[in-house]
Image (spheres, grey):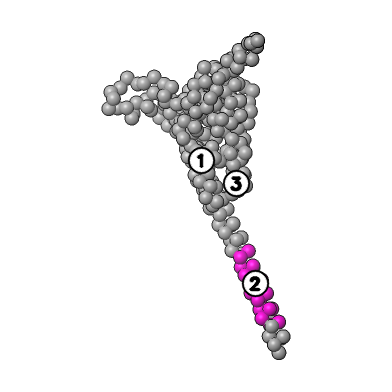
Amino acid sequence: MELAKLWVEIIGLVASFSAAIVALRAFLRGEQWKRAEFLAKEMKEFLDNPRVQKALLLIDWGSRRIALLDDSADDHGYVLVTRQLQVNALLPHTFLSPASMEESDAISSVTQRYTPSQAAIRDCYDAFLDGLERFSSYFETRLINIKQLHPYLRYWIDKIHEPVQNADDAAWKAALLTYVAFYEFPGVQSLFRAFDRSIDPSAPAFRGFLEKMKDQELARRLAAAAGSEYEGRRVRSLIQSAPART
């Protein structure tokens, strides 16, 4: 009888343990589904944002007419956006000449240093980068994992990070990465690192873009604004070609 009772207790424990495992698996599947549903909703809101949509066009095209301005503007708000226009738009405000305004108007003077098209480009990138900051926070708090972000963001992460040979593309990328560093989007930098695509000022990718730029003086200024040491292509070539001291 004692042996039978023991077997009954063992069978009961096994059954309870099995039921607990089944319940745990069902709970985890439910949690995964909820997180996937949450991310899909967040991504839809992000990608449906008109400014984000324009930012993706800005990233994807070297030259394209984009409806940057409101419909009341000339040509229904369409602007031919080139890489050079984007570079000019993304320059830190400290690069630009101060507007001739009273000191009391200092806050509004920053926006008036940029043309309407340039200001609109900055707004689009701000919306895009703010969204990446949000997704980075979800990743950092383990609400989602990096694999869940791949289908949505991998193309754009790679597009920004990948090497280029064209000097105009290099200048645009260097200006964009400087913008991220100068205006402090640490979550964006963290997210790129999680994708193994570092855009930190000290990363090879950033330095590679600087080296491809035609305007090396601007490259050095961008590096300084981003907090990176960069001596420039010309300076290094002079150092390397200098005769060795005996």
The answer to if 12 sits in the magenta stretch is: yes
Residue drawn at the location 55% of the way across and 47% of the way down: 139
Considering the image in quadrants, where does the N terminus appear? bottom right
The answer to if 72 sits in the magenta stretch is: no
Q: Is residue 113 left or right of 154 when viewed as pictured?
A: left
Give, as a single range, the part of the protein colored magenta.
Answer: 7-25
- Secondary element at tag 1: helix
Closer-to-camera residue (154/53): 154
Amino acid carrying mark 1 in the image:
Gly
Closer-to-camera residue (147/116): 147
Considering the image in quadrants, where does the C terminus appear? top right
The answer to whether one can see residue 161 in this image is yes
Q: Sequence-wise, which precedes: disc 2 or disc 3? A: 2
Look at the magenta stretch and give its main secondary structure: helix
Q: Sequence-wise, which precedes: disc 1 or disc 3? A: 3
Residue topped by disc 3: 146
Q: Sequence-wise, which precedes: disc 2 or disc 1? A: 2
* Residue 102 x/y as whole percent: 28, 23
* Residue 51 x/y as whole percent: 48, 36
Alpha-carbon neighbours of circle 3 within 10 Å: few (<14), some, or many (≥20)?
some
Amino acid carrying mark 2 in the image:
Phe
* Residue 80 x/y as whole percent: 51, 24
Residue topped by disc 2: 17
Question: Which is closer to the viewer, label 2 or label 3?
Answer: 2
Report how far apart the C-alphas of labels 2 and 1 lie in the structure: 42 Å
